[in-house]
Image (spheres, rainbow, N blue to C red):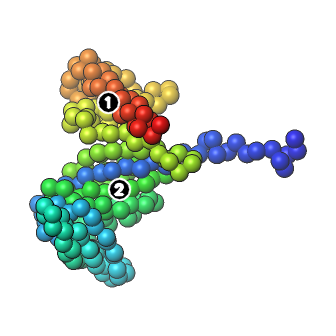
Amino acid sequence: MSAESRPSTDSRHEPTPLRAILEVELPESVQCPVARETPNASAVTQTITGDGGGQTCQNEVTVADGTTTQTEYVSTSVDESCACAAIRQFECVFDLEGVRDGALRVSLVVPERSLLGDVVSALRETGASVDLRRISRLGDDGGSVELDATAITEKQREAVELAVELGYYDRPRGTDLAELADRLDVSRSAVSQRLNAVESTLVQSLVADRDVQT
């Protein structure tokens, strides 16, 4: 086989994009009209207009009330407290899917896992509470495998986020259970149980998702 016809192996080392669903609960000080005026919206179509001198966020919001569906239009100026503005500074694709109990439901695709952490950190810097509800790894064929994170508790989520941040799942590992336990102020067995619970939940979700697809 000639050098010209030999297949490239570079793609094996390229990170696989991730799709994530976030629920973003804004602090009381942020008067986002989408979250405040339409706290339970089934769909949102958003457009941001303007330039560096001032931008306006315009939204077409679908609100379902029982069997009745109505469309509302809300807009606001964009500032540093805006959750969407915090996401837009990163190289990712995102969509505001709707609102549930006042929390924005955001779907985004990032090229690699580390960028997802950066997006979440930026949102939290605005004072928002961020909950990762679902994460998918996009396949080369355009499909995805979804992992349902809704059954994971806050303490389990805190433990696994710290473990990822400190490199517990890296090879070689960047930390161990003792350091995680010290940072979380719990016993090593408690940390181990929380991480094992998260791993079990995600594995079961993965298997269930594949069963549905087949």
Q: Choose between 45 and 7: the one closer to the eye.
A: 45
What is the secondary structure assignment of the residue under circle 2?
Answer: strand
In x, y percent, where is residue 73?
A: 21, 77
Task: Decide which of tag 2 and tag 1 comes sooner along the chain.
Answer: 2
Report crowding for label 1: few under 14, some 14 to 19, many 20 or more residues within 10 A (C-alpha). some
Q: Which residue lies most toward the top here? A: 189
C-alpha distance separating marks 2 and 1: 21 Å
Q: Residue at x 37, y 49 (%)?
A: 20
Would you say 134 lies left or right of 99 here? right
Report crowding for label 2: few under 14, some 14 to 19, many 20 or more residues within 10 A (C-alpha). some
Q: Residue at x 42, y 34 (%)?
A: 211
Counting labels gives 2
Q: Which residue lies most toward the front here? A: 67
What is the secondary structure assignment of the residue under circle 1?
Answer: helix
Q: Choose between 108 and 214: the one closer to the eye.
A: 214
Q: Residue at x 27, y 21 (%)?
A: 193
Q: Quadrant of the N terminus?
A: top right
Q: Quadrant of residue 59?
A: bottom left
Q: Which residue is mark 1?
A: 201
Q: Are marks 2 and 1 in contact (CB under 8 Å)?
A: no
Q: Amino acid at mark 2?
A: Ser
Q: Quadrant of residue 93?
A: bottom left
Q: Which residue is mark 2?
A: 107
> Is 99 rendered above or below residue 118?
below
In x, y percent, where is residue 107?
A: 35, 56
> Is 94 rendered above or below residue 1?
below
Q: Residue at x 26, y 74 (%)?
A: 60
Can you see residue 30?
no
In x, y percent, where is residue 189?
A: 26, 17
Would you say 146 lies left or right of 82 here? right
Can you see residue 118?
yes
Q: Amino acid at mark 1?
A: Thr
